[in-house]
Amino acid sequence: MLMEGNVLLNVAIVGSGTQGSMLAYRSAAFGRRVRVYDLSRASLDAAQAKLEVWLKERALAERFDAFDADAVRARILYTADLGEALEDADLVIENVPEVLALKQEVWAGIDALAPEKTLLTTNSSSLKSSDIGRDVGRKDKTFNLNFMTPTKDDLVEVMWNKETSEDTKRKILAFLRAQENVPIVTEKEIKGFSLNRVWRAMKKECLRLWSEGYISPDDFDRAFILEWGTDYGPFALMDIVGLDIVRQIELTYYDESGDPSDLPPKKLDEWVEQGRLGVKSGQGFYTYPHPAYEDPQWLRKGRAEG
């Protein structure tokens, strides 16, 4: 059903990959009309296939009293035409790879085609909206969002830039709360948000410990879960994010700092070049679709072999 009193009803998702497909599902499930754009028809088809998996999961959980599957499907249009995707959009969420020049190009194209009313954001976890939006005219309508796993959790980091208007802030917070997200706001722009900067520091040290042979990902994740009570550890989370994305994010920090310590380890470079990308390739720090950490006995077993 459409959320009364929320003016942001038409959502365009630019980029139909892992995050884009999840965001389309989340918004459609909460009554938005969603248009998903991608240059790749194969990527659009994959996003549509993932939607069916998530709908089936909700059906099995008997949660379709408020999430009717046919209605959700009907609210999503998949298109390779950017103009069609942006038609009457209230909000555009960009999800292209974590490369500043590419995002700047995409934002300039969106800015030229989208209606004047349209708010424009990125789901980047490391690049600032003021940098991405350098060449757009609607700077007062730009800001950052960083969703985690929109099909499963409610957390979203929000970050304003110095141009973000109060009207934009009000509208986007209402939009997020209406689809049961919990917005955590970073009031001043800083690379990587707030929570995500802390996660990045942890991730960087985990990669160093692994690449220099101090500890296995298996053992570290088990220690982390036992100490903090999480469902999985940092290495598993990197697999879920995608090791190519993890690598690219590390490179954005290096591009800004010039500090060699911010470069991703060579071992991670090698894995990415080999196509060892985590969940999406079937092999990362763990093997998928049945990773070791899903085994109830794994957590308390002896030291990992190999």
Image (cartoon, grey):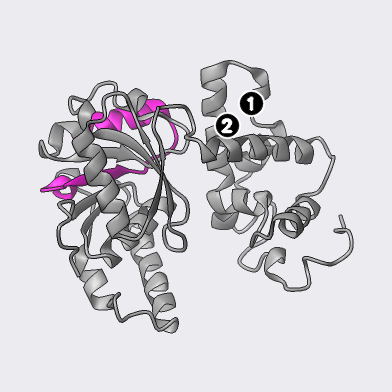
Q: How far across and down, in percent of the image, does residue 191 sit?
A: 47, 28
Residue at the location (26% across, 39% down)? 169
| Residue 106 highlighted magenta (yes or no) | yes
Earlier-in-chain disc, 1 versus 2: 2
Q: Quadrant of the C terminus?
A: bottom right
The answer to which quarter of the image holds residue 108 is top left
| Residue 1 highlighted magenta (yes or no) | no
Against 248, residue 36 (above or below) is: below
Residue at the location (29% across, 67% down)? 29
Q: Quadrant of the N terminus?
A: bottom left
Side of 47 relative to 253 (left or right):
left
Q: Which residue is most to the top? A: 258
Residue 62 visible? The answer is: yes
> What's the distance in space between the residues labelled 1 and 2, CA to CA?
6 Å
The residue to which callout 2 is attached is 250
Side of 54 relative to 34 (left or right):
right
Against 254, residue 97 (above or below) is: below
Find the magenta span and give its range. 84-110
The answer to which quarter of the image holds residue 62 is bottom left
Q: How far across and down, in percent of the image, does residue 50 sit?
A: 40, 66
Which element type, helix, strand or loop, lies under badge 1?
A: loop
Q: What amino acid type should be assigned to the residue bearing mark 1?
A: Leu
Q: What amino acid type should be assigned to the residue bearing mark 2?
A: Glu
Side of 147 relative to 65 (left or right):
right
Badge 1: residue crowd in 10 Å (few <14, some 14–19, many ≥20): many
Badge 2: residue crowd in 10 Å (few <14, some 14–19, many ≥20): many
Residue 277 visible? The answer is: no
Whether tag 1 and tag 2 are in contact, CB under 8 A, the answer is: yes
The residue to which callout 1 is attached is 263
> Mark on residue 169?
none
Residue at the location (26% across, 52% down)? 175
Q: How far across and down, in percent of the image, does residue 91 sit?
A: 22, 45
